[in-house]
Amino acid sequence: MLTRGDPLAGLLDGPRARGAFMIRACFEPPWAVRVEDRAPLTVMLMARGDAWITSDGGGEPVRLLPGDLAIARGPDPYTCADTPDTAPQALILPGGECRYPDGSSLNGSMDLGVRTWGDRPDAPTVMLIGTYLMQGEITGRLLDALPPLLTLPADVWQCPLTPFLMEEIVRDEPGQEVVLDRLLDLLVISALRAWFSRPEAAAPAWYRALGDPVVGRALRLIQDDPAHPWTVSALAAKAGVSRAALARRFTDLVGEPPMAYLTARRLALAADRLRDTEDTLAAIARRVGYGSAFALSSAFKRMYGVSPQEHRTRAA
């Protein structure tokens, strides 16, 4: 169970789909689809048959067998195909737009019914695909911790959600979009928990730093109460070291100073609340540790390049 002090909780508290793009893709070999949608995160679960995924982010092509799962981290393009050598027959662009490689529109020619796409519903290859469409649905800290393409074979990761997801993805019921969003979130969290639990997992620097008796204490204080008026001196006193010692050790292990980490944490929380609630900017500022809406707005624009209102409008 993930608890308040569990480092994984901070890492995985982020996937929150809102109207995610989900389909059952059915293909007859030879087939290949080039994905250039720049989505922050896409999950591919192999339900039947096999497929090869080649990422432009580097690495060798990866083969998926039934039960295997892959997660592609945007914005790098990638290609899914029956073999690594098959030329793409379809191109997926931002907004779910589908085109032939020559740029002409597919015009719905591969639509097969409710959330089903491809050659024919009973094709030998079936993939369940879920795509987070907006950056804010996945925290930047989580995205930074992931490679361009990660895979989990069925023999090290068994997902009880697969049969249920196979049934739900093609249902056309009231509220179905919300059901699928939550299933996608659970699928991603379960997969990433398995990924980061591997002995050879390359966890991010701040995650590894949580195991340090000094820096880990400071990190947990920030994560548990980011709105508190923390200073380096206050964090150092709680951690039982001098201000200079904490600043040096924190920067060495995490890769950024304590106050920079605190600022990023506060602004990420503010971005989530701007997207998920109708709270006023002043209320959000108080909740994440800023003295005024103006102070939050200024810091937010420096970090994200847009105002809080622009961020909220884009999310809507």
Image (tube, helix red, strand yellow):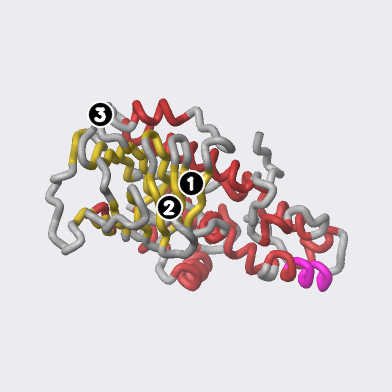
* Mark drawn on residue 182: none
Choose top left, top right, bottom left or bottom right for residue 247.
bottom right
- The spot of residue 137 in percent (x, y) is 44, 51
Mark 1–mark 2 distance (CA, rounded to whole Å): 10 Å
The amino acid type, in three-letter code, at marker 1 is Pro
Quick check: marks 1 and 2 in contact, CB under 8 Å?
A: yes
- The spot of residue 310 in percent (x, y) is 36, 63
- Mark 3 or mark 2, earlier in chain: 2
Classify 10 Å Cα crowding around label 1: few (below 14), some (14-19), many (20 and above).
Answer: many
- The spot of residue 25 in percent (x, y) is 29, 40
User: Would you name the residue on which mark 2 appears?
Assistant: 41
Q: Is residue 182 above or below residue 131?
A: above
Query: Is-magenta flag for residue 290?
Result: no
Mark 3–mark 2 distance (CA, rounded to whole Å): 24 Å
**Residue plotted at (40% across, 52% down):** 53
Q: Nearer the viewer, mark 3 or mark 2?
A: 2
Q: Secondary structure at mark 3?
A: loop
User: Would you name the residue on which mark 1 appears?
Assistant: 15
**Total marks in image:** 3
User: Would you name the residue on which mark 3 appears?
Assistant: 172
Name the main secondary structure of what is drawn in magenta.
Answer: helix
Q: Nearer the viewer, residue 227 or 76?
A: 76
Quick check: marks 1 and 3 in contact, CB under 8 Å?
A: no
Q: Quadrant of the N terminus?
A: top right
**Residue plotted at (46% across, 47% down):** 70
Q: Nearer the viewer, residue 149 or 250?
A: 149
The amino acid type, in three-letter code, at marker 3 is Asp
Quick check: marks 3 and 2 in contact, CB under 8 Å?
A: no
**Residue plotted at (19% across, 56% down):** 99
Stretch of the chain drawn in magenta: 243-250
